[in-house]
Image (tube, helix red, strand yellow):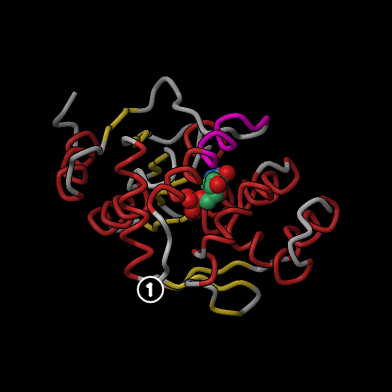
Amino acid sequence: MQIAIDGPAGAGKSTIAKKIAQIYGITYLDTGAMYRCVAHCVLKELGDCFSDQAAIIKIAKTVKIEFKQDQVFCNGEDVTLEIRTPLVSQHTSDVAKISEVRNILVKQQQEYAKKNPVIMDGRDIGSVVLPHAEFKFYLDADVTERAYRRHKELVQKNIEKDLEEIKQEIESRDENDKNRLVGPLCQVDEAILIDTTGRGIDEVVALIKSYIDGETI
Ligand code: DC
């Protein structure tokens, strides 16, 4: 079983995908975390020198990314919290627009999907990573609500950030993700669009489940 979930930042993709994975007993692969790991390593090894593409590609080629339950490890180091900081978020789209970096990570994601039933979330899952997935969903939500959700997540992690600033960053990330040349964020024709604005997690999960179980056509 392969399920693809795409959509912009803060649309609820990872929360929903984790729950769907539990329901169907399949693995959840957070592809955004993989791009975040590369950005984290670049920050660690090169400072914020995101203009050195050759060095970034070298890091993407050698970095060892592992998922263990809810934790993410980068070259053996637990980076679960570090990869969610605003600094890493801001730089992740810089690494995600480099085609060689995308090729390296897409290949790993596809290899994983060959061996495991999987639900993946990201930006290019339905279009590039799993073009033959049985189920494809595109989750979207009003940008103000997406900013509120991110703000709430940051507050829970004791990270202070102005709501308007978060909204602007989300808009700028969406813009980068939609307009890059390789693997841009897009809704493929066969993906089911789900607007999560004003909808609770359980409601969205139930809706997706009804599509997968063939109850909603
Ligand atoms: O889903 P997220 O917010 O963790 O994604 C972090 C960044 O990585 C975001 O700028 C988009 C990018 N990304 C991507 O380009 N392709 C993916 N498959 C997943 C994420």
Where residue 78 appears, x then y in whole percent? 54, 78
Q: For the magenta stretch, what is the residue range?
A: 172-181
Query: Is 206 covered by the magenta stretch?
Result: no
Q: Can residue 170 be seen here?
A: yes
Type of amino acid under label 1: Asn
Horizontal and vertical percent position of residue 196: 25, 38
Q: Which residue is mark 1?
A: 158
Which residue is nearer to you in this view: 69 or 2?
A: 69
Residue 71 located left or right of residue 111: left
Specify the quadrant that holds the N terminus: top left
Mark 1 crowdedness (10 Å alpha carbons): few <14, some 14-19, many ≥20? few
Left/right of residue 138 with respect to residue 44 in the rendered view: left
Query: In the rendered view, would you say 82 is above or below 103?
Result: below
Determine whether the residue tagged by mark 1 lies in a helix, strand or loop.
loop
Residue at the spot 32% in from the left edge and 48% down from the top edge: 12
Residue 180 colored magenta? yes
Residue drawn at x 50%, y 39% is 123
Quadrant (top left, top right, bottom left, bottom right) of the C terminus: top left
- The outermost residue toward the bottom is 77
Q: Residue furthest top?
A: 189
